[in-house]
Image (cartoon, helix red, strand yellow):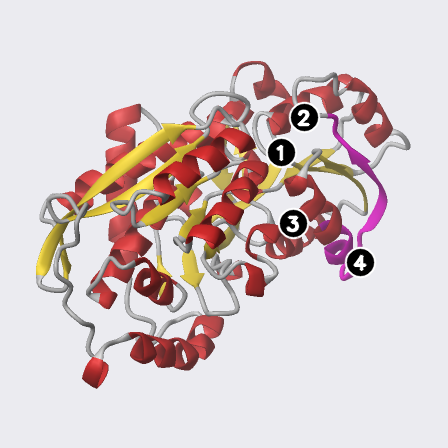
Amino acid sequence: MATPASDPSRLTRRGVLTAAASTLLLAACGRDGQPDDEAPRAGDGPHEIVIGASLELTGRGAALGVLQERALRIAQDSLSADGVPVGNLRRSVRLEIQDNGSDPGQAARQAAALAGSDAVHVLVGGALTEVSMAMVAVAQERRIPFISLAPGDGIVSPATDRTYVYKLTPDATDVAWRLSRLIEAQEARRVVLLAESGLHGDSGVRAVPEALRAGDVELLRTVRLPDTGQSLGRAARRAVAGDPDGVVVWGTAPNSGAAARALRQAGHRGLIFFDSGAVVEDTLAGRNAEAVEGAFAVHPISLAGSTLTNTTTAALARRDFVFRYIQRHGGFSGFAPYAADALRLVVDAARFAGSVDRGRLRAYLQSQVTEGIAGSYAFTPIRHGGMERDSLGEYTVNRGSWVRIS
């Protein structure tokens, strides 16, 4: 599915980045520009690529974390069927998955333990921003590549302090830009931003006002949601004061659906717009269903699956993943493919490098330009948040399902 960064790309920015990425690939190779074969190390196991994952399988982030575990296991089965050629070996993929309980401290401890094992080659995890941030320091200190599954631009910036850290979710500035276009298209002229507490909400507070200023939309005010589990009524009433045309809810599930419910209970009959963190089953489920019907969201194109007529390599991989996911779990969640993309990025880095050495994996991760299941990525040494703006689509909730409109 992925291609070396020296291949041409249909995305404009990806094409521009190709030359720099190719130079890095050659620098990372061995003599004569070819990767060195690597002999098995002590603790390497039976020729494996080992991914250490800390995920929110319980706690407030479970609506996101469980999806990532499912995606990892589907991708693992697909990749391990024939093994992955790495240098002169063919390696299987092994997962070491731990439940961090949505607790940043626990995630940091798990990351440290996983990184302390010579057998673990890469860390993956953190569907919640605070959890991912807790793992960043471990990755940098232990010099082990870490692929974050959480939203939040601060995860990979400043780049000089995040040399081993990568993020797959779209940047807040790109999501906000697409949301501003969507808001204008729906002819909403006066909106309120309702942002959750914490780092993800902070990124929305920075990005949304700037994006709206570039268009013909007035931001009446910004209101912050209280911590998860607290009453949202007061924040919702502040948000709907003055009868805005729409409310932008910037938050992750389960906060997103709860916020929509609170807005309707506070009397809001206007439009609701979600950022990509809302797009999971929990937002549409149960008590939220009536409140979110007709709402809009910006999310990567993976939410729409693949059409039967699209036969590109990426589209076929996306279709296969969606089929396997539905077969196992009865339905598909657009948030799920991030972890599958993380695993494939690691495998491709190992294949290109001819090695599972952590430093070499880092070098090849930061030079990948590829089309994944969730969307397209373009990593460079100074840009480790690789989801491309062109990968984003616009959706609405129609009869309890996300339907793509653009």
Q: Which residues are magenta?
A: 208-226
User: Can residue 6 be seen in this snapshot?
Assistant: no
Q: Quadrant of residue 113?
A: top left
Q: Which mark is nearer the camera, 1 or 3?
A: 3
Q: Position of residue 127 (x, y in %)?
A: 49, 37
* Residue sitting at x 26%, y 35%: 73
Q: Which residue is mark 4?
A: 213
Q: Residues within 10 Å of mark 2 (few under 14, many from 20)?
A: many
Q: State the image coordinates of residue 172 (x, y, percent, origin top left).
A: 62, 51
- The answer to which of marks 2 and 4 sits earlier in the sequence is 4
Q: Is residue 126 left or right of residue 50?
A: right
Mark 2–mark 4 contact, CB under 8 Å? no
Number of other residues with Cα within 10 Å of mark 1, as a class: few under 14, some 14 to 19, many 20 or more: some
Where is residue 3 shown, x and y percent of the image? 28, 66
Q: Within 10 Å of the Cα at label 4, are there few (<14), some (14-19), or many (20+) other Cα atoms?
A: few
In the drawing, what numbered circle is on residue 260? 2
Q: Which residue is mark 3?
A: 179
Q: Is residue 236 magenta?
A: no
Contact between marks 2 and 1 (CB within 8 A): the answer is: yes
The amino acid at mark 2 is Ala
The answer to whether residue 18 shows anywhere in this view is yes
Which numbered disc, 2 or 3, marks the residue that appears first in the sequence?
3
